[in-house]
Amino acid sequence: MRRPVASALLLLAAGAALGCFDRASRPAGAGAPLSIPTGPDPIVLRAARTGGILRAARYPALDTTIWRSAGQVPSLDRVLGFGADDGYLGATDGTGAPVRVDLRLGTVTTSGGDSVTMVSTADGGSIFVMTQRGEIVRETPYGGDWSMRPALPAHALFAQPDGSLIVAGASGDRAVVWRVRPPTQGISDSLSFDVGGEPGTLAASIAATAGAVGDRIFFGADQMVIAVRTRDLGRALEVDVGKPIRAIAATPSGDRLFVALEADRRLRVIDRFEERVTRKLKMPGPALALRMDPLGRMLLARGGGDSVYVISLGSDAVVGVLQTPWRGDLPLVLPDGAIATARGADVVLVHPETLGDLRTVVDGASQFWHVLRWNGFRPRAKGIDQPVQFRTSAPRDSLDVRADSGRVAADSVAPTAFTVSFAAVLDEGKAREVAGRIRVEGQSPRITTVEREGQVVYRVVLGPYATRGEAERVGRASGQSFWIFEGTP
């Protein structure tokens, strides 16, 4: 009677040894109920992978379209960035060329001319591209307005929210990081790291692993993980991991970096504050690429073939293995934590803990998928297209005066920035018309938004500038009516 029991135990032990990383191959229950964290609306954007109309749905109602683009997008490969203020989505097509989608107007802009090798954007509006001719160009919604031929090497671009561009490159056996502030042509500051290695290998390593999170950019330089502070271009991290680096992914807060090495089954975890490798996570096989959940709940690692390893960041453990192709958009972690995977012609949503099937989207694999959080598709308030009425005619933008500001304290510090404002209207189309006919010294105004009493106000501005005199000179050069206000938009 003991023999069958012993045999059963041996079979269970063997099954656990063979399948400890493959929970997707075993029956799984529904798992704990999933919920969407509070915040802006969870939006899923989809378009045919061959190109076509881009559609938006409010997750989880994937079968209900709440918005569609007026123009057709080309075949999309990946999303670069999104600016919630202006509603611009920056992406690349199948050739690597930039694509801009205005989610407010529904317009689609593609880039013509030279082939590009690198693309970066911080807000979807201003997109920096590196052409095959070795020139860096900035493309805005109104066309290319700035370009430069860099004197230092460029292998990774990091567009910044303040309009500047940080560039990383390899020069000999050194990694070089530098910044340029358009519309100027000169390099404002730079630093370098002695990392060793072959120049060609070093350049490829920087290009393949570059990323940004919060106030830091990071990349792998051969066997060195490097991070740089964006505010002052100071050294933030230098960690030697002992092997060539294949991929890096950062948590949304930037407190940890997960590093995949060549031919190594263990992920290195680097703590930002301890500035060292604090843990090694064993996986079923070496990771070829990494993809972080936008909310930092899990990490997806590409394995061999169509294998994808699911890693829980709460427990720092491998949950299991999924079978799905690795694309520029899929697999994708959705707002409630479900993982969208491609399975044949369909997209199957699986539970993040049990990896059991939750839902199937028929023919979903023929579409490009992207998720963002945004309230911009909500209905517009009544009367939003009426002109803005100002209480006074003071020569400054009254929209920037807080209602509760009261009187200015006698010991307050005087503002040091001045912005030129050409319009403040409730109709976005009118704002774009104004911006489209203004160009000063190669620069076009940008459109910013501010909410007042439940209404969105669109402002057409240039600046900020260091002095009021400089701001007034720009305003006069525009040939348009303008006013100057103190501060930044």
Image (cartoon, rainbow, N blue to C red):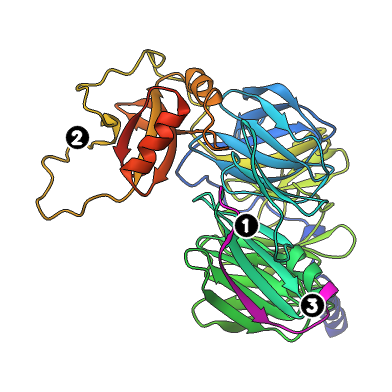
Q: Nearer the viewer, residue 43 or 249?
A: 249
Judged left or right of residue 457, residue 107 is right
- For disc 1, the marked residue is 158
- For disc 2, the marked residue is 403
Marks 2,1: beta carbons within 8 A: no
Which quarter of the rendered picture does the N terminus lie within? bottom right
Q: Nearer the viewer, residue 373 or 15?
A: 373
Cα–Cα span, label 3 and label 1: 30 Å
Nearer the camera: disc 2 or disc 1: 1
The quarter of the picture where residue 368 lies is top right
Write down the region rendered in magenta: 183-200
Q: Amino acid at mark 3?
A: Arg
Visible residue check, residue 449: no
Between discs 3 and 1, the one toward the N terminus: 1
x and y, in percent, of residue 323 in the image: 83, 55
The residue under the point 77% across, 83% down is 243
Secondary structure at badge 3 equals loop
Q: Residues within 10 Å of mark 3 (few under 14, many from 20)?
A: some
x and y, in percent, of residue 346 in the image: 82, 38
The residue under the point 53% across, 46% down is 35
Secondary structure at badge 1 equals strand
